[in-house]
Image: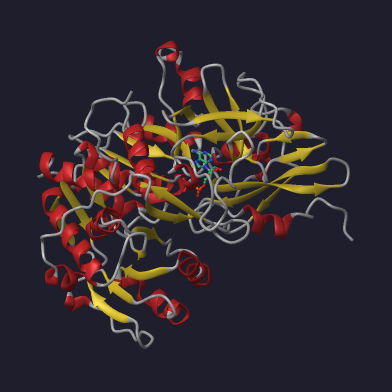
Amino acid sequence: MLGLMQDQPLLISTIIRHAARHHAAAEIVSKTVEGAIHRTTYAEIEPRARRLASALRQLGTGLGARVATLAWNGHRHVELYYAVSGMGAICHTINPRLSTDDITYIAQHADDTILFADTSFAPIVAAIAPALRARLRAVVFMTEPAHMPDIALPPGMDLLCYEDLIASAGDDFAWPALDERSAASLCYTSGTTGRPKGVLYSHRSTLLHTFASNLKDVFGLGAADRFLPVVPMFHVNAWGTPYSAPMAGASLIMPGRHLDGASLADMMNTERVTCSAGVPTVWLGLLQHLRASGKRLESVERLIIGGSACPPMLMRAFGDEYGIRVDHAWGMTEMSPIGTYNRPKSSNADLPPEPAFRLREKQGRAMYGVDMRIVNDDSTELPWDGTTSGHLQVKGPNVCAAYLGDTPGSALDAEGWFATGDVATIDAEGYMEITDRSKDVVKSGGEWISTVQLENIAVGHPDVAEAAVIAARHPKWDERPLLIVVPRPGITIDLVSLRAFFDGKIAKWWQPDAIIVVDELPHTATGKIQKMALRDRFRDHLMPPG
Ligand code: ADP
């Protein structure tokens, strides 16, 4: 027997319709590429998204067609999210920090037919357009006619202006009732090994992720929030926040390309931001700016940190010096992306300060819709004791089952689990802690050493700006940890004190065998340290010469 409730598909267009009707005046404030501040509301965004959808239809965009974006966080990018997915096409956000070679590969692999770009990305567009001429019909610059860049596109590829498109379109477009399982958006993983792979989200997976990520113990945004996503909209849909904010009626404060500490602090204060989310690197930049300038964040209550392990010193510094709560979250592109979020349970709400802090350092508890487990090399499930570490696997309706172009279900094992590539512990209360990436962990004489834990200690030292630990080959132990550090500006690292800094914080045999000081570390397009490049360079550092 079926239920007798109204049968409505879970569609992305319902979010913007809800926001426009019930949170009409909530704002979207954007710092444009040109630097000016632009203000709009959900009530204005929704009809513009419909006009854009209508214009896209005029341009021949049908159901399932791929429409690409190369853009920072801003109001037009929000309109594109809703216009493209809402009309039944697929919004493919491309990371502009990738190499032009990777961007070309991705656009070809995705079969993108129209590309929307911020004017600041005109050089990338010029570089990739010739290789995309077979399929790409038009490039639309996300600006007004006065700011159109002067670039030459291959014959047959149209150069269009975003505001012209919207102005020319009718406003009689109605959001279609799609199958909720239809593809809605597409993100490629950063591809630290091999080529990037496409993760194709559906309307249903996006809506379920949006509901769950808005629970109180996850993002928990509300209509009184003014949320600033530092995490870019080309990085797993800014962790889904361009959906979760309008669903909750929260305003969106969009920083564009201005992501340095000073610009962020300024925008947070002038726009009365209450909550923000991003990777550790940006918060380090913000912290350095606050300390150097003596400024404070006047309205920010909470910073959400994910994407890489949150260094404990960041959590302490924002908490102790600025009274701002830092929450740790974990996820990945293949999970839409939120997997876990760290908030206390009633059973551990009254812990003394240090154990409570130690608990908050973990990546957190599984969000509703995510199941997880840890297994050994033979896929046997391991205990939730907080100390046994194993390969972390996940399951759920927001988790990828196959990459774009692969056979259905091919990303899963026989029992339907997806291997995250992370190594983790889970404690009795379900708090997960990442100890490493499977391919980064140091296997010293058959025992595992967590590079993340060593890095967290190293960046807690006052001389160190950034740190990476890699597995270096070792004649006796197979692998031993090698610490590579970047000094704080103008500081010479005191290596004796840095070595002593590990004493008592880890088992003696975890102590790095050597420390190398470098001017900078290589980063991936999503801001993570490129350990592969470091391994290529320093792998044999501990081996005898020759
Ligand atoms: P995202 O775009 O969310 O950063 P990616 O797919 O680029 O996702 O990378 C996912 C990987 O990033 C995870 O498998 C994990 O190794 C790492 N990661 C994400 N969040 C954290 C975290 N809070 N702590 C440690 N590692 C993390």
Q: Is 357 placed above or below 261 here?
A: above
Side of 512 relative to 241 (left or right): right
Q: Is 255 placed above or below 8 here?
A: below
What is the residue that sits farthest to the front in this orientation?
1
Q: Nearer the viewer, residue 230 or 200?
A: 200
> Residue 320: image x %, image y %?
38, 29
Name which residue lies at 72% across and 36% down.
Answer: 511
Q: Nearer the viewer, residue 441 or 514?
A: 441
Side of 52 relative to 90 (left or right): left
Q: Quadrant of the C terminus?
A: bottom right
Q: Quadrant of the N terminus?
A: top left
Name which residue lies at 17% across and 58% down.
Answer: 50
**Snapshot quadrant of residue 205:** top left
Q: Nearer the viewer, residue 369 or 331?
A: 369
Q: Is residue 436 visible?
A: yes
Q: How is the image coloured?
A: secondary structure
**Snapshot quadrant of residue 19:** top left
> Residue 133: image x %, image y %?
42, 80
Q: Is residue 298 visible?
A: no
Side of 210 relative to 103 (left or right): left
Q: Is 20 placed above or below 392 here?
A: below
> Residue 82: image x %, image y %?
25, 53
> Residue 169: image x %, image y %?
14, 68
Name which residue lies at 47% across and 23% down.
Answer: 357
